[in-house]
Amino acid sequence: MSKSWGYFKEYDSMMKAVEALHPPRMRMKVAEVRVETRTTKTFKLVRMDGEIPPFRAGQYVSICVNIDGVVTNRPYSISSPPTITDYIEVTVRRKPGGFVSHYLLDRVNVGEELEVVGPAGQFYYEPLTDGRDLVFIAGGSGITPFMSMILETVERNLPLNIWLIYGSRVPDDVIFGDKLERIAEEHPNIHYSLVISEPPEGWEGLKGFITADIIKSQVGPVEGKTFYLCGPQAMYSFCIPEIEKLGVPKRKIKCEAYGPPDDVTREPGWPKDLPPDATFTVEVIGRVRKKFRARAGEPLLNSMEREGIIIPSLCRSGQCMVCHAKLVSGKVFTPRYALHKSSDVEFGYIYPCISYPIENIKIKI
């Protein structure tokens, strides 16, 4: 055998191993649908074309769907732990005005197939930097990555101390509430606090928003603790300053990407007096050529997908930097929390998942 043939054979084996760990697509079947609350279901997914790739608790997968001719995808955190290797679970809450969440909750049943991408994401425990004392602050469906982390901790008997503070609007929409209470009762290193922002009459638990005072009362001294946050963008805007009031350095605060804001017009820097329903012309050039109208208040990627223009995407939060397009002319608005590679800024590339047209634009894909 020649050396060159041996090299290609070794390279082929290496690429097969890489693809097994990071498959470009997975065909998965819905093996079970479990109702969690009146707004939330958990989907148990079994892979049909191979093994479940390894993942870290806190990562997500992106579920690809074709909804009445519109091809799109949405990221969902894996709520099952990595100790389970024959399936994954994703927990989906109905989003007001949502598109994919309504489809999954109302139209996807046991036995149906889904195309899934991932796992991906950087929101996970890093033992070299995060220490052993962790504070998890969750809002709404932001509990899902923490469920995976907590289950891995108890199943592997990891030497971690976890304080979970979970904010919910009302008590009857708390996801995994009974399971979390049971885990906290059985494992002294897991602490669980529920905070209700709109408490019913007679509620005796913690009330309001997750303030510095509530955090301090439930967690105690913050020195040496790493804080993780997952929830709607409004929760980050409120909770991060509250955590910083306690003297927690920014390097000890980790936030998960959580999609575009519910109302982008309330983001700092949004053009004054520009209504979300204003429309602008989007001209696409490059491998696709098309013109269409797009709403200012909707992510550009959503508008493109409705027009049948599909580009690679994963997190849909301006964090993974997978989707990109060159802004040839015009202006878009991007929330401040979105990440940007310096090279993309230099050469005029935008991330359509978190970019909003605020005048007529031309983009190249």
Image (cartoon, grey):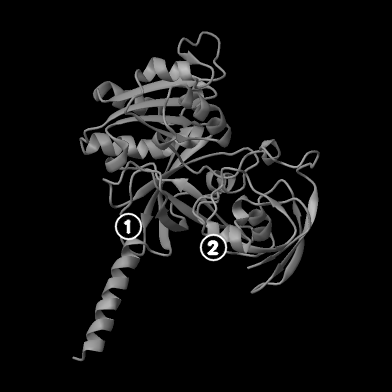
Count neighbours of disc 2 (C-alpha within 10 A) and say few if under 14, some if 14 to 19, many if 20 or more.
few
| Quadrant where the image shows the N terminus | bottom left
Residue in view at x 21 percent, y 39 percent: 156
Q: Quadrant of residue 186?
A: top left
* Side of 152 where 34 appears, left or right: right
Work out whether 324 lies above or below 39: below
Q: Tag 1: Cα neighbours inside 10 Å, few (<14), some, or many (≥20)?
A: some
Mark 2, residue position: 312
Q: Are marks 1 and 2 in contact (CB under 8 Å)?
A: no
Q: In the rendering, which numbered label is found on residue 34?
A: none
Instruction: Report how far apart the C-alphas of labels 1 and 2 lie in the structure.
Output: 20 Å
- Looking at the image, residue 62 sits to the left or right of residue 20; the answer is right
Q: Residue furthest left?
A: 1
Viewer can see residue 323: no
Q: Position of residue 239 (x, y in %)?
A: 51, 27
Residue at the extreme bottom of the image, as rendered: 2
Q: Residue 53 has which mark?
A: 1
Q: Position of residue 243 (x, y in %)?
A: 46, 26
* Residue at position x 40%, y 45% in the image: 78
Q: Position of residue 308 (x, y in %)?
A: 66, 64
Quadrant of the snapshot with the C terminus = bottom right
In the depicted structure, whether residue 233 falls above or below residue 284: above
**Amino acid type shown at disc 2:** Pro
Say which label, 1 or 2, has the lower sequence index: 1
Between residue 40 and residue 289, name the one nearer to us: 289
The answer to whether 154 appears left or right of 308 in the picture is left
Q: Pick the residue in front: 101 or 197.
A: 197
Tell me if I can see residue 36 in this picture: yes
Q: Amino acid at mark 1?
A: Pro
